[in-house]
Amino acid sequence: MSYSSEEYCDTESGNIINCSFLTYEEPCKKGRNKFSNPDICSFKSLITPLSELMPTGSKSISPIEFIMRRKNRVVSLQFQPFTGKLTSSGVTYLSVTQTICNLPPYPVYGVYNLEYNSTLRQAPIVIDPTDPRTQIKLYLNSNGTANGVNVSDTVSIKSACISWIV
């Protein structure tokens, strides 16, 4: 027996229990729960304005997986690598359409790697609690501008992790 992203195995009874913060598949074995940490959750989200959004290593277009972990007061957010094509020109950053909890008290900046039209770059990633619509921003240029960003350009985002204190 396996269980979905909304279920996990109760270690005492071996029953499947509904739980929205766990996302993995593993056989349910009585007395054993490999992963029952409520401080870790994952979610999938679209990235705008990208078309042909595809996780690296996947053969189909799908949302991107994010893993969020909170230990004590430190939150870490990691995402899987992905590729896509821009659907508009003059874009400053890519937006993650999912809002998140455990936000920092002010914007937190980090750096991630991307390939823009086959050219490797480093650019800022921002967790912004002041913007209610776009809390996760992946900038396309290191200076945060839209210079040289055109429709149909290819973007390959490398996996990254950013942490902050709540």
Image (tube, grey):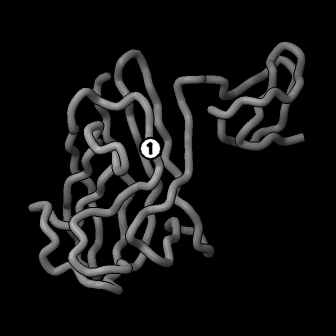
Residue 74 image offset from top left, x and y in percent: 35, 24
Query: Position of 39 compared to 138: left or right?
Result: right
Total numbered badges shown on the rendered structure: 1
Residue 158 image offset from top left, x and y in percent: 36, 61
Quadrant containing the C terminus is: top left
Q: From the viewer's perspective, is residue 55 above or below residue 119? A: above
Image quadrant in which you'd find residue 99 = top left
Residue type of the residue flagged with mark 1: Thr
Q: Tell me the SS state at disc 1.
A: loop
Quadrant containing the N terminus is: top right
Q: Which residue is mark 1?
A: 99
Q: From the viewer's perspective, is residue 59 above or below residue 78? A: below
Q: Residue at x 29, y 24 (%)?
A: 165
Residue 10 image offset from top left, x and y in percent: 81, 21
Query: Position of 9 compared to 158: left or right?
Result: right
Image quadrant in which you'd find residue 146 = bottom left
Q: Nearer the viewer, residue 108 or 35?
A: 108
Residue 129 image offset from top left, x and y in percent: 29, 37
Q: Identify the residue at the far bottom of this view.
A: 152
Q: From the viewer's perspective, is residue 162 above or below residue 145? A: above
Q: Identify the residue at the far left of this view.
A: 143
Query: Position of 48 compared to 110: left or right?
Result: right
Q: Residue at x 32, y 63 (%)?
A: 94
Q: Residue at x 78, y 30 (%)?
A: 18
Q: Nearer the viewer, residue 129 or 140?
A: 129
Mark 1 is surrounded, within 10 Å at the Cα level, by few (under 14), some (14 to 19) or many (20 or more) other residues, namely some
Q: Residue at x 52, y 65 (%)?
A: 55
Q: Nearer the viewer, residue 147 or 38?
A: 147
